[in-house]
Structures are given as C-alpha cells and as structure tokens.
Amino acid sequence: MLGIMKLSAPGRYRAALLMLCAALPALADTHFQARPMTRDDVPAGKGQCDIRLQVDIEAEVTVRGDLVAIHTISGRDPRDDGSECNAPLPDHDVAGFNFQVVESRNEIRLVAEPSRRNNFAAVVRIRDTATGEGRYHFRLSWAMTGSDYGRTSGNQPPPTRRDDNFDRPPATGGFSWNNSLSYRGNGSGTATMNNLGEMGLGEVTIEIDRGGKLVASFRTGERGRGRPIAFSGQILASEGGRWKADVMSDDRRLRGPMWISVDDKQQVNSVTLEATDGQDRMRLNWARR
C-alpha cells in the first residue's frame, strides 16, 4: 500500500507559490502598441480597436488598453499588420462591448471579454491550419463614457504634489497613450511566500501607458523557461528614476506596493514588492546584474 507523502512547511509554501504562478498567463512572445486611428468614420461616442495580424498556425491575442500581447502557441510569431485604435480599451467595466471578425482565413474566436477578473482585457484565439501566414482582422468596439474621452484627448490634470514627497507621473511628454514606455532588465532575484517557498526570478519586462497603468512580468526557472510571474497596477508616484506602484497579481489574489528603479536608457535597475491577501504574504526582490 502506498503511503501519503506529507510536505514540510517550506515545501507547502513553495507549492503554493508554484500554484499561484500556474494561474498567471504565459509571458507574451510578441507585444506592440496599436497606432492611433487616423480615419474619422467611427461614430461619435464609440471606442474601436481594429487588430490586424499575420498569423502562422496558432496564437492567443490579448488586448489591454491599446497594448497587444501575443502568445505563440505553435508556428512562427504573428506580425502586426496595421492595428489601430481610436481610444484604449477602458480599464473599467466596458459598456456595449462587441467583438467582430472582419477578415479571417481559418478559425478565430473570442475566449474572454474584458472584466475585472482579467484586468479588463479582451482575449482572442486564432488557429490557422493553411500553409504559410494568414491575415486576420478583428474589431473590438464599445460605448465610450465620460471618463474615456479624456484618454483620447490628452487633456489630463496637471501633476500634483503628494504627501510622500513624490510627484505624480507627468501629464505631458512620454506618458501618452500612443507612446507607452517599455523597460527591461537582465538580472536575478527571488519571490518568497510567507518567508518560505523561494522562487528564482530572471529577466523582467515592465510596460507603462499614459495613464500610469503598469504590467510587470518576471521570467522564472532555469534559463527563464518556467512559467512567468506577473503583476499589473497603477503608478502612484515618481521621483527621478524611482517609481512607486500599487499592483496585484494577475489572479487578483495578492496586492501591495511595488518600488521600481530605472535608468535613462529604459533599463530596470531594481524591483521590490510586498503583496498580501490578508493571510499570505509575498516578498519579491530583484536586481540588475
């Protein structure tokens, strides 16, 4: 009769950390920002993103705001073929959301509408079984609310001083929704659950849009081949190359402050995080080599 293996406390927490990472989406193989839409035939009050891609075999496409992330399931990495948005997909409940297939060669379907559960992203699966690349064009549309109009005009309130002596991200310059910032860092670190169950971290990628929305992804495992661990949230304050953000894990279980240091070449120097759900606590420390 086989005995039941019991995990030690460190083993249990390492397993919990692995389960958390398993719930997070795989790091995208390709990502880009949809360009601002120049045509003027979209009805007033309607937000619209036209995503045009060249796809070989199979891929999963995630649209969050005006950022497009593509996970290649098989075949070559898909290529952007003129994607554009007249406004970012809202980062709140989306009214009148609609998915439309405009052009396809094989299978294309919506697998997830924007919701709080996926941090308001639309997820589309494409499967192309024909030879070579096929062109795919799908359209996301929604009813724009009052808060959405400010995201297209760039008329943001001026920076204000905070009681923590940090400035809010600037309202002009680099933080334009059609000019997001991308930072990368080659380094190492650890993520620890309840001071036990340590996981090694590798390369980090951080994307920030005009509104200060942030997505940070860390590669894990030997040579970065493990399932990535990712967080999304909001930049709260900045001072020089130091940023403070409020983030949560992609399964929305853990939340806390993330501190990020970057240089003027858009390289990440260091990242620290303490996140909790009120019971479990994760500590993350990462530094550039």
Image (cartoon, grey):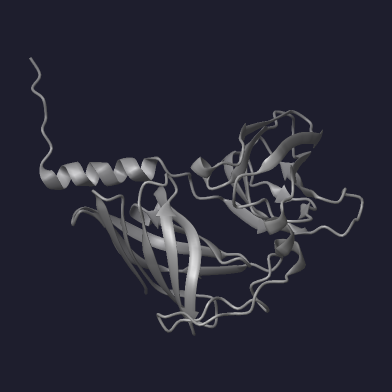
Question: Residue 282, located in which quarter of the rendered image?
Answer: bottom left
Residue 30 appears anywhere in the view: yes
Image side of residue 188 versus residue 99, left or right = left
Q: Position of residue 284 (x, y in %)?
A: 31, 62
Question: Residue 199, located in which quarter of the rendered image?
Answer: bottom left
Question: Residue 186, located in which quarter of the rendered image?
Answer: bottom left
Image side of residue 190 versus residue 10, left or right = right
| Closest to the observer, 54 or 169 | 169
Q: Is residue 65 above or below residue 179?
A: above
Image side of residue 256 versus residue 214, left or right = left
Callout count: 0
Q: Is residue 49 above or below residue 243?
A: above
- Quarter of the C terminus within the rendering: bottom left
* Residue at figure coordinates x 20%, y 53% from the top left: 194
Outermost residue to the top: 1
Q: Position of residue 242 (x, y in %)?
A: 44, 79
Residue 103 appears anywhere in the view: no
Q: Position of residue 268 (x, y in %)?
A: 46, 73
Q: Is residue 115 above or below residue 127?
A: below
Q: Is residue 215 above or below residue 93?
A: below
* Residue at figure coordinates x 78%, y 50% from the top left: 81
- Quarter of the N terminus within the rendering: top left
| Closest to the observer, 175 or 57 | 175
Image side of residue 146 versus residue 209, left or right = right
* Residue at figure coordinates x 10%, y 42% from the top left: 8
Q: Position of residue 60 (x, y in %)?
A: 60, 39
